[in-house]
Image (spheres, rainbow, N blue to C red):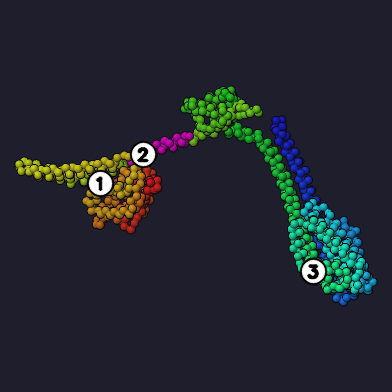
Amino acid sequence: MRKQYTSRTKLLVPIFILITILMFLAIFIISTYYSKINILNNLNNKIELSTHISNLVHSLQKERGLSSGYATNKDEQFQQKLLIQRKKTDKISKILLNKIDDLKCKEFKKSIDDLKQQISKLKNIRASIDKGDYSPEDVIYEYSYTNSLLLDMIVSIAKRNSYVPAITQDLLAYSNFLYLKEYTGLQRAQGVVFLSFKKFNKEVFTEFVNLMAVQQQNEMMFLKYATKDLQKYYIEQVKDNSFKQVWIMERIMITKNHGNYNFDAEKWYQLMTEKLNIFDKISKYIEKQTQKKITDELNNSINFFIIVIILLLGSWLLFIDIIFNLLKLLKNEQRLRIVMDKYIISSITDLKGKIIDVSQAFCEISGYTKSELLGKNHNILRHKDMSKEAFKELWDKITTGKSWHGKIKNRKKDGNFYWVIANVEPLYNEKGNVDAYISIRMDITENELLTQKIQDEEKRNKIQEELMQQQHRLAQMGEMISMIAHQWRQPLSAITAASGAIMIKASRDKLEAQTAVELAQKIQEFSRHLSNTIDDFRNFFKSNKTKYKTDFKKICESVLSIIESSLERNKIEIIIQYDNVEEFSSYENELKQVILNLIKNSEDALKEKVTDNRKIAIMLKNKTLCISDNAGGIDEKILTKIFEPYFSTKTKKDGTGLGLYMSKIIVEEHCNGKLKVSNLGDGAMFEIILGDDND
């Protein structure tokens, strides 16, 4: 029990340490990304707020330009445009104030209070402008102060740490660009004032030139922080014709310090407004790109945050499951050992083969008790049927550190035997040296007995098949003897007649030399025919288990030479059709027996069922031979049984039933082909189909 407790401790302590480390790591990551998500969310809202602020700045810039022009010369055109612009400004400022209230930006509370106060003061400023109480310089100052409050808020947002350098860089570029835009708006207002004076005003001119210099400085700062894509976009936008026209007007205003210009304040305001509209387009592009980066970073952070949470929960569940399973395994360890001891045939020996431990299953199958086996050499179980070489191979392998696997026949205590599949493995100590061998066995006694039974049965079947084949050959020999008798009858009669003629003529002394020679030649010719017939039948039954190159045409001609006299005698017409003759390798004599058997069956069926117009057709195409007749076919009820042993279709019951059975065995098992049967319109057809294995 103490040993089990120690093993559990060794397993569980590292797991708990790992869990603790992972937990703190996960909490740190979650905390970091949670903070980052909050910052990005907050920044995203403030960028949206910056967009509204930028819109208000742009609107106030237009109103400032129109107000300064109106304050200078009370031009009605400026007045009409100014009234329209004031409505737009009020609408935008209302949207901004609502957004500020929704976001509840506490960190900008003082700036927001100042901004609200300045926006509410805007009504009084407008009233003073309309009354003529404000000079152009006062107008520019009041609107510029409001815009400075708005821009200060945007700059404060840009300076906040976003945790993403690319976003911080964009925000810095954005704030510098808004100042560039603001000073451009101031230049527009100052230019309107300058052009509205009928005489040259040095102070206004100096302020105008200073604003141009400040714009250049802000443009440089903007391009410094702008990304390459933003720089490219900016350069493309400032190629607009309005920028070129403004530049030309600036050069004229700087070089000519008098009022004789070919343009007026209205023209200047219009071109500068076009330039500022393009700047507004650029600022919206920056806002959109920055917001997209924040959104992408926010989505990535949220996704990573969710993944970490899922992994943390999954890790907890996994480790809980591991602990549960470890405890379950440790709890069931003893039970498993009992089961293994009861059902697994195992033994452990020392390096000399002495048994140092055995399972209960080992004792039960061997018939020995544990005490009878411990300390004994393992060869106590050795059966006399096992050779010394088998055990030498076993020891040669395991002594070199390899495992051995094989079948072993062991002897029981009562002298009986049992078979096992054994796997013997070396056991290593802590130093890496082999100090014992373990053997795991599986009882295969029933399998071995069954295998032996199957082998015995196969031997009996083989003997039975050989007997059946011998019966088949004997039956065929009976048919052959009958055919030999028929084939020899005519030649023997001719020989008898010729020899009788010689005898009669010689006894009467009338035998002429020429006649004797002719009769002797006939006797020799008939004798050769008889000899050839004997050779044909002898070759037919010759046992030859070597495959030779042959073809169906050659085989059929050989078979027909044996049976043709019988077919002629029974008035059976042979129809032969060779479409293509293809050579193959096979057992020629065995195929001859099959073809002779099929033709003989057709002959018997025709003699039994047909009186006139008896026909047997032999068709050959490649390695397929078809033999058919017009004997009326085979009854469909028995068509599937005709290849069974001892099944006969002959009505006289004088057949053995082995002919078709052995024919099928020869074709399909010996010659790797197929023997098929089917009924045609007026008879049966047998097909011998040889496969590619006979090439």
Residue closest to the eye, 659 or 387? 387
Which element is circle 1 on? Answer: helix
Let me know if residue 462 appears in the view: yes
Q: Work out which quarter of the rendered image holds the N terminus and state it.
A: top right
- Three-letter code, disc 3: Gln
Mark 3 neighbour class, 10 Å CA radius: few under 14, some 14 to 19, many 20 or more: some
**In the displayed image of the protein, which residue is found farthest to the bottom?**
76
Residue type at mark 1? Ile
- Sequence-earlier tag: 3 or 2: 3
**Could one spot residue 53 in this view of the protein?**
no
**Res. 168 image quadrant:** bottom right
Q: Which residues are magenta?
A: 448-469
* Disc marking residue 562: 1
Please identify the dominant SS of the magenta region: helix
The mark lying in front, picked from 3 and 1, is: 3
Label 2 Cα crowd, 10 Å radius (few <14 / some 14-19 / many 20+): few
Q: Residue at x 50, y 30 (%)?
A: 409
The tag earlier along the polypeptide, 1 or 2, is 2
Q: Position of residue 631 (x, y in %)?
A: 29, 55
Of helix, strand and loop, which one carries label 2?
helix
Q: Position of residue 667 (x, y in %)?
A: 36, 46
Magenta stretch: includes residue 468: yes
The numbered mark, 3 or 1, whose residue comes first in the sequence reads 3
Does the CB distance between marks 1 and 2 fall below 8 Å?
A: no
Residue underneath mark 3: 245
Q: Which mark is residue 109?
A: none
On the image, the x and y values in percent for residue 216 come to: 83, 61
